[in-house]
Amino acid sequence: MKMLLPWELLILLSLKECLAENTRHGPVFTQEPSDSVFPLSTDDKQVFINCKAKGNPPPHYRWKVDSREINRESDPDFSLVEGNLLINNPHVINHGGVYQCIATNSFGTIVSREAKVQFAFLQNFSRKSRNTVSVREGQAVVLLCGPPPHYGEIKYAWVFNGQRSLLQQDARRFVSQRTGNLYIAKVEASDAGNYTCAVRNMMTNATVLSSPTPVVVRRDAVMGEYEPKMEVQFPDALHVSKGTSVKLECFALGNPVPSISWRRADGNPLPGKIKINHASGVLEIPYFRPEDAGVYECVAENSRGRNVARGQLIFHNVEHLHWVQTLKDAHMAIDANLQWECKAIGKPKPAYRWLKNGQPLTAEGRIHVEAGRLTISRISLLDSGMYQCVSENEHGAVYASAELKVVASPPDFTRRPVKKSTVIQRGGEVVYECRPHASPRATISWWRGGELLKDGRRQTIMEDGTLRITNISKSDGGRYTCVARNQFGTSSSTGTLMVKEPTKIIVPPLSLDATVGQSLVLPCEVSSDSSLIPVFKWFFNGKAIDFIRQEHFEMIGGGFAGDLMVRNIQLKHSGKYVCMVHTEVDTVSAAADLIVRGPPGAPEGLVVTDIADTTVQLSWGSGPDNHSPVTMYMVQARTSFSIGWQTVRTVPDSVPGQMMHATVTDLNPWVDYEFRVVAINSVGVGEPSTPSKQIRTKAAVPKVAPVNVSGGGGARGELVIIWEPVPEEQQSGEDFGYVVAFRPLGSSTWIQTVLASPDASRYICRNDSIAPLTLFEVKVGVYNSLGEGQFSRVVRVFSAEEEPSEAPARVRGRALSATEIEVYWEPVPSRTSREKIIAYEVLFWEEGSGQSDADRVKVINTTAQLSGLKGSTVYLISVRAQNSAGLGPSSPAFNVTTKKPPPSQPPGNIEWSLTNSKIFLNWEHVKAMENESEVTGYKVVYRQDWQGRTTVLETNKTSVELQIPSGEDYLIEIKALTKGGDGTSSGPIRIPKMSSLNSKGCVCPVSMKTCCFMMFIFSMFVL
């Protein structure tokens, strides 16, 4: 059977629903009236009672109230809105009652469940004055409320002396919500006054007030003390349904005022959910459950005695009526037997009755009724109609409806004809169904051509009229006709049978082994009837291969071949492959297994044990070998000091594939390690295992000594020793430090000092008795909390030399410009081969200030250029030499005066003209002021726009001609040249691109704060 696609199924369901809606049928309620209480007030003018039914044709509606049919023409208070009943100007007496909706169409009538409709109302109190109540102080009093006629839940309260707030209840005063009466356990003088009973309807929200009841407290005598007297108490027995809330009232009169307490008679504690209002004497049990049932006691007590009220709460297990078996519509042929059964559950046990078209159905003749079972023998057309089963008990009733359609018709193949054309393979089997619509059921016969078919060795006519032919041969092809007859007529339907040769797979796929990354082809070739077109499908592990989404698969071939190519095979491609070939008449398939061999999977369950200072023991479980046995394992480790994972040494050196443990060696002590294991097989290296939990090797005495020990330099009287610190991963434990040992060459006694810092890389021994450039033997050792390790090899180190004793000679200088001075001197000669001048320091300061304010410049040769100076200023200059021990004496200071500063005025009135690739520039001569250097020439700087190589041209004229390529924008600056340096720039002058054109321009001096820029474009005459 063909499986429907989701969109096909959706269309089919929608079509089915559409057909169901268009099918003619009797009425079915979709909404029925229910018991309702409507609040009735002066603003309520209309009330709706709902009823809605579906049917085809659409039903029309009638209503009954108290079994009397409503005549809308004679009673204008009633009207219909669709099926809903609208009551205009509802009245509590005229319109309260039991309502029932009746729906009818051409197929029959159904009645709804009965709905009790009531109206909540609250009438006014009588205006008649109430008698005065006279009571002695200390006596008890009960004031009666006497509520007016009402319906719906009401709440009682009392008002004292017309106050706006309600009388507050307490241990002395209690308002019963069952009677409305006000109980005062002990009257006090302040209780004298007028008392008004207030009644509120909770549905209509209406409130009415009684006439005041005057209370007079007599002063002639005081009531003596007496024991509690129960005035308000709950019933001796009360039935409570599951899930409801129950309130028990209890109040006693007495002097002194009694206290109220609650308890269970069986001694069990009160449930935690119980709410007790001790002031008002009310106990509330919400969500009543079976375990809440029992005898409850209210105890009233004062100093004169006590009194107890008892009552039993009985769990009332009410099971509401509901259907467990309902009715289904029946479409039956004439003379058939009908049997319907309905079944409901409820307590007490329900009774049943049956309705036909809304009227009671009586058992007589062919009709038998037994509780919820209805039987009608040999049905006729007159039995058609709407039937209802009604199940009811004292708590209500439920209705189940169904339609009986009695059909009488001749055979008809319109909706279900015999299949017109059937194609079957030779040797196969065909089943022809013959299912005409007929009432009563038709007798069936089959014909092939003009030959009546009967049961035989290969052909069978079944009881329902289906024809079955097995082991089909070519001779079975032809036309088959089903003939159906009943007393109302005869009809037939014909189909054609075509026999084809069966399909066979002649080149099936074969089971193969492959390696990850390879590609292969699984063949699938068939032989089939030449008139049939085979369709190939491939399945992988039971799922159809989607050749569009799965890039590894491709179907190749054509016609009677549909081979499967698998490219770049991966481990996930291992499994069963099925080639399925489908034709119009048959389906054949062949399967093959593909085993993909790949690198092994990750080892599992890696555990680290036997942790020592340089070794640990590893054990693990094997992962999947991916169809190729593991040949060996490789162990890798990672620390915070390593770059990624590194292969470590193990015992055995090469771990064979059958061994699941190894000892890791040559680890560093006191280092945090993680380990992982990688499996290897003939295909390649597999995925690593999950890293182990981080472990720390045990501490040990350090084994690695510092390297690159050397020294020298420093200040006079110092011995400087330096080394390369031992890396943290080689410190082997806590409290790591260094032991520095040294001795003068030729001495036998080592001087040692301890440095407790693991990061130390330098030690300076200061002692004024150490002569300059004394040769020492030096070594550096290590230690940690477990002891001392090795020393480095002994090296020789010189102590510091002394500072230079001479100042540089023949120091002189000259002013280069207003801001620069060049200073030069002769080098300081070395006293020994070990002494070396490493730098010179030049000090310079303005005349009139001290040497302490001097600026400093350090150089390594014997010349220095001082810049950033002031023009026309006298500077004092001194030079001193420096070696590793420090600075020597300064040379005698000498003075140099900087030149006058260049003019501050830039070149002005600049004019330019452009002719093809030449720029002509003219400007005014810059006149220097008295305190400025004389102009000796000009510097012209130009470049292409803001980028490109800068070109500098110097001239002693006030004009210049520049040869530049055409077609580019240029920026030009002009500065005056003086002995004091370059003057102020004219600022950038932009010469715009003027390809094949003539242009001119001018720039006024910046100091004028005005800029004029003129450009003239002349036409060029082409000769």
Image: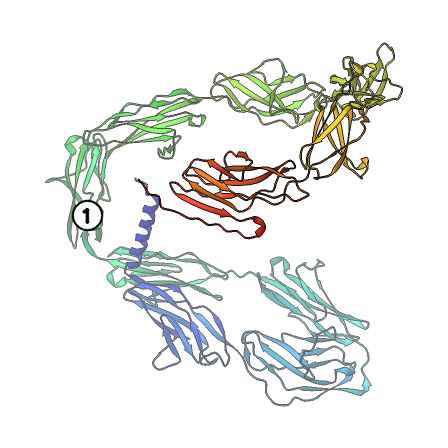
Which residue: 38% across, 31% down? Answer: 551
Image quarter where the C terminus lies is top left
Tell me where residue 829 appears, x and y as whole percent. Answer: 78, 18
Q: Is residue 738 left or right of residue 505?
A: right
Q: Is residue 736 left or right of residue 538?
A: right
Q: Which residue type carries mark 1?
A: Thr
Q: What residue did someone put label 1 on?
A: 443
* Most foreground residue, 88 or 282: 88
Which residue: 81% across, 28% down? Answer: 892
Secondary structure category for the residue under label 1? strand
970 vs 637: above or below? below
Rendering quarter of residue 838: top right
Dot 1 alpha-carbon crowd within 10 angstroms: few under 14, some 14 to 19, many 20 or more: some
* Most foreground residue, 111 or 563: 563
495 vs 762: above or below? below
Tell me where residue 915 appears, x and y as whole percent. Answer: 41, 40
Rendering quarter of residue 387: bottom left
| Residue 891 appears in the figure | yes
